[in-house]
């Protein structure tokens, strides 16, 4: 089959070029799950927050806030903001111990993100 392009040229269309509805496709993620994943990916889209996650992972999954502050030329309120975004996205939890605050990775959320990426990277299987 042939048709004219916008530039007036002939274009050959094969069966492989024709879109056909695939009834086997379906949404695998619910609205709540999608919102949680989107919030986590949005939180991870900031380079500082990615570096914070990496630092926490190097500390065996938990480190003191002072260890985080030491690695950045940012104010303490800015670091606190980044930590809050990570907490709100469910990627970390924080616990005050005396005058220190320790931050821990939420391994179940990281595992869920990993599972989602593996699911979509497996070309739908």
Image (tube, rainbow, N blue to C red):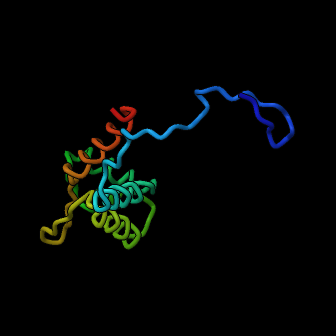
**x and y, in percent, of residue 106 in the image:** 21, 54
Residue beneath the point at 35% across and 49% down: 27
Camera-side residue of 25 and 59: 25
In the rendered image, which quarter is residue 34 located in?
bottom left
Camera-side residue of 83 and 64: 83
**x and y, in percent, of residue 30 in the image:** 29, 56
Q: Is residue 100 left or right of residue 8?
A: left
**x and y, in percent, of residue 100 in the image:** 19, 67
- Quadrant assignment for the N terminus: top right
In the rendered image, which quarter is residue 58 located in?
top left
Camera-side residue of 55 and 121: 121
In the rendered image, which quarter is residue 91 located in?
bottom left
Q: Is 123 placed above or below 34 here? A: above
**x and y, in percent, of residue 31 in the image:** 32, 61
Q: Is 95 placed above or below 25 here? A: below
Residue beneath the point at 75% across and 30% down: 2
- Quadrant assignment for the C terminus: top left
Furthest-right residue in this view: 8
Q: Is residue 9 left or right of residue 35?
A: right
Q: Is 104 placed above or below 17 here? A: below
Q: Is residue 67 left or right of residue 94?
A: right
Camera-side residue of 45 and 24: 24
Furthest-left residue in this view: 98
Q: Is 17 placed above or below 67 here? A: above
Residue beneath the point at 36% across and 35% down: 124
Count of numbered circles in the view = 0
């Amino acid at each position: 089959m042939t048709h004219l392009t916008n530039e007036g040229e002939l274009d050959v269309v094969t069966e492989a070029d024709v879109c056909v509805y695939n009834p086997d496709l379906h949404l695998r993620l619910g609205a709540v799950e999608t919102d949680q994943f989107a919030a986590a990916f949005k939180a991870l889209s900031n380079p500082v927050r990615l570096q914070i996650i990496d630092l926490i992972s190097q500390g065996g999954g938990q480190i003191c806030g002072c260890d985080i502050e030491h690695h950045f030329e940012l104010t303490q309120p800015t670091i606190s903001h980044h930590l809050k975004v990570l907490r709100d996205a469910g990627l970390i939890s924080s616990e005050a111990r005396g005058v220190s605050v320790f931050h821990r990775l939420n391994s179940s959320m990281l595992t869920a993100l990993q599972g989602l990426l593996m699911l979509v990277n497996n070309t739908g299987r």
